[in-house]
Amino acid sequence: MNNIIEIQNLSHQFENGTPGLKNINLEIQEGSFVVIAGQNGSGKTTLLRHLNGLLMPTNGSVRLAGVPVSKNLAWSRQMVGMVFQDADSQIVGETVYDDVAFGPENLCLDREEIERRVFRALETVGLIDYKNQRPHLLSGGEKRRLAIAGILAMEPRILVFDEPFSSLDYPGVKKILSQMISLHRAGHTILVAAHDLEKVIAHTDRLVIMKDGKVVRDGLPSQLFGELEAFGIREPCASRMGMEVYSWLK
Amino acid sequence: MAEVSALSFRPGNSLLHRMDVRFKIVFVILISLASLKARGLGLFMLTSVLMMGLIHAGLHLKSVLKPLRYVFFFLLFVFMARSLSVPGSSVIEFKSISVTREGLFDGAMVCWRWVVVIMTGLSLILTTRPSEIRAAVEWSLNPVPLIPGKRMATMMSLIVRFVPVIFEQAGETLAAQRARCVENRKNPVYRLKVFGIPLMRRIFERADKLALAMEARCYSENRTSPRLSSDVWDWLALLGVVGLCIITVL
């Protein structure tokens, strides 16, 4: 498979001089499901925000399908759909329909195409019956699904989830997780930033561990379970008990 | 939160729902202006037509009256101020204060006009998608030189989007402070300071996150606008409203 994301010698320093990322090198294949794990402040979100040019590197480069992100920001943002940690602050529209249409409208698509994309995205996440609802009246899980619909309507190839399960109840986690799995099966490349691996790790094929702005481990999840706690990440419960890690959906 | 949303768009398929938003805005302006000149019979006609329109649109008046209760306090204040300040034949006298017959009549008329204006605004807000109102604002500002219509319209829609967020943040801040016995501090300046500063900080943080989320979804001023279209029913309705306004003013 092709590398859809190529990160070379990426470093980022915040305006106050704090280093955010230090010399990151990563290649991510198209269609893969990758978890980026690390403690709070390890640089996960900073790394993800370089993928669509919300942050620009101090040094190094990020390429999507061979094209530098900085070369065409609008294209990069269409290519990489990002679901933020706080779904509430991602919602722009006054109704569910308007919010999902926001991205396609920014892409200057015609009305028919916008409508087609909005309905398809809402059907995918199961929110079609809420299209006229005010977004702030939705539950936490529904808001996150709305955020997913908002980026699906832009038809991205890469989907990035920043702490997708934070402050969700069990049914909410299951819905978001099954959504992520079906999107992966549909061919999307999925990147998930998480500090708690328990809910998602059974479905991923690669685990990247970050600490202090650096990638400290990168490999198959099952091979890295034993090292997780050394980097401040809780080892999945089943693995601690010497069992095979199983899905939250079972 | 729920009260704020009670005064928002409600889906439907009535004549009011189907009308072109630009015509509806013109109706709001015309009826509001006519109510300033109208007297008893004219106001009765305007109220009756608006009431029928709202009921036809499938709106339960009771559900919008509760969130508007503070407006009725304002109307009561206006009524009392008028009845005490307009000179004329006295109905009730107490020391130097006197309530006049002309004042009572004048106060009732002013309040009635306010009610007509509020009902007109309600009939627009409750039957029109916010994105359509935004599109109409954009359309009406387009010919005005030096005013960026698209930017103004987006700002307006973001304000609408942010009102419930501000209420929510204010509610959370207040609850958190009550949990730490802020009510024991009697100094209003102190209480305003400890309430206002964190609230403003949280609102600005939310605004920052929203700006980032908009950027991630390729926001630009050059975007697809909602489609506005009028038909013969809109023109017939315009004729009807103009006729009604003329009759009520005469």
Image: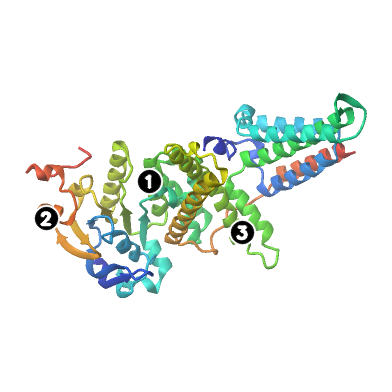
Instruction: Give the answer, above or below, for where B243 lies relative to A110.
Output: above
| Residue holding disc 2 | A227
Q: Nearer the viewer, residue B144 or A46?
A: A46
Q: Nearer the viewer, residue A107 or B147?
A: B147
Q: Nearer the viewer, residue A196 or B130?
A: A196
Q: Which mark is residue B152?
A: 3
Q: Name the side, left or right, on which B226 lies relative to A77.
A: right
- Residue type, label 1: Arg
Q: Are marks 3 and 1 in contact (CB under 8 Å)?
A: no
Instruction: Give the answer, above or below, for where A217 lies relative to A240.
Output: below
Q: What residue do we see at 36% from left, 41% from top?
A: A141
**Measured from the top left, where is residue A94 in percent x and y?**
53, 47
**Disc 3/disc 1 C-alpha distance (Å):** 28 Å
Where disc 2 sits, the SS reads: helix
Q: Residues within 10 Å of mark 3 (few under 14, many from 20)?
A: some
**Measured from the top left, where is residue B228 in percent x and y?**
63, 52
Q: Name the side, left or right, on which A37 lies relative to A92.
A: left
Q: Which residue is situated farthest in the left direction here? A: A242
Closer mark to the observer between disc 1 and disc 2: 2
Q: Which mark is residue A144?
A: 1
Q: Are marks 2 and 3 on the same chain?
A: no
